[in-house]
Image (tube, rainbow, N blue to C red):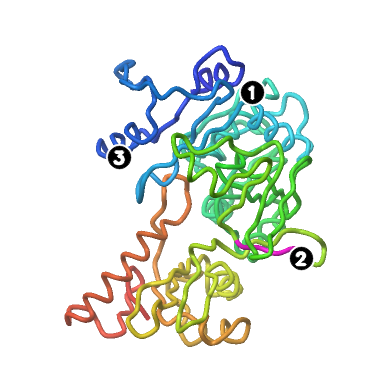
Amino acid sequence: MLAALAAALDGSGPAILPLDPGLPAAAVARMLDALAPSELLTADGTIAVDNRAGIAEDTAVVIATSGSTGVPKGVELSAAALTASASASLRRIGALPGERWLCCLPTFHIAGLGVLVRSLVTGTEPLITATADALGGAAPGSWAHVSLVPTQLRRLMAAGSRPDGLKTVLLGGAAAAADLLADARAAGWPVVTTYGMSETCGGCVYDGLPLDGVSAAPDEEGRIVIAGPVLFSGYRLQPELTRSVLTPGAFRTADLGHLGPDGRLVIRGRADDVINTGGEKVVPGEVEAVLGTSPQVADVVVVGVPDEEWGEQVTAFVVPADPARPPDLDHLRSIVRQALSARAAPKKVFVMPVFPQLPSGKPDRAALRESALRDSAQRESGQGEPGGQRPDQGAK
């Protein structure tokens, strides 16, 4: 993978489309049909694919997104955009020549791939591990920088695994709770929060401030617009979708945000995740931030679940700080009512030991929403427990 990426970046090799090796055959078939690579490299060798679509000469990488729940999209990234992103990132964190990166995120997602690009730009060999659990197993001082998602950081902190010589933790992929950031920084973890997506070569806003050469600000509708040299070239073989979000030099994201008093970008959440309940629009990310202030909550995800009376029902999934004392629904509703509104307060709370995750390490919101729907169906059929309170799956 590293050699193929290096060749794609310097033009000596073809553009690459890294895919999850764990994808089922049907998902792989959808990817091949939608993204049309000319060759498929597997553990058993290289297979030629009948494809005449071609690709832009400056495209180095195509990142596949949304393949498990909808029509796959291929985000085309040029070598110039990838190297501009890596260089700006390295400058921002003050990485020194020779400092190595640990790669513990999947390289078929932009965060893991970005670690490889930074390593290639600095001419260093990354240390690659399957999971973040292996952090403590590396020799002290053998690497200095790492990219993590919040769930990984929380587990590492619980295990007391902060390694020696750590200089930077780029934390992204999902919103990090305020208490997690505060606890991590108090414990000496050098955390830098990042915001970005595949279309921006990964994180392009660090601790609320865009990288050099990048601008990120909300438009009149509150949608975040990003400009700069890190933007993707387009969606593979989907020109209309490309034109709907990408204009010369600017990308209109699906995220909502605003600029704080200090000029830093504040992310509210995704526009397509907004919950319409009783005619009021609720941003899940804002509810999650409020619920995360409760000392009884270790982690939280909020989704909208279809409801005949309200249109959608605000539903929270919580990992308790103390499994023996899960948070009470009335308590959680109270803090949300005080901070936001009564409509934003969750109607139902599911207490779980862990969240189902996507390969990227993000919580699987679709799976959580489906579990809530199943629970509702079981209750309507009389199979569910009234007020089910089991910590592993119960609703409160």
Identity, as a three-letter code, of the amino acid under mark 2: Gly
The 10 Å Cα crowd at callout 1, few under 14, some 14 to 19, many 20 or more, is some
Q: Secondary structure at mark 1?
A: helix
Q: Amino acid at mark 3?
A: Ala
Of helix, strand and loop, which one carries label 2?
loop
Q: Which numbered tag is attached to residue 322? A: none
- Disc 2 target residue: 260
Q: Which residue is mark 1?
A: 120
Magenta residues span 256-260
Q: Residue 202 falls in which quadrant of the image?
A: top right
Mark 2 to mark 1: distance in Å?
35 Å
Label 3, secondary structure: give it.
helix
Q: Earlier in the sequence, mark 3 or mark 2?
A: 3
Q: Earlier in the sequence, mark 2 or mark 1?
A: 1
Residue type marked 1: Leu
Question: The C terminus lies in which quarter of the figure?
Answer: bottom left
Q: Where does label 3 land, which residue?
A: 27
How far from the left and from the top, in percent, is residue 357? 41, 53
Q: Is the residue 225 above or below the residue 337 in the image? A: above
Q: Nearer the viewer, residue 101 or 372?
A: 372
Q: Residue furthest top?
A: 12
**Which is in the foreground here, disc 3 or disc 1?**
3
The residue lying at 47 percent from left, 72 percent from top is 275
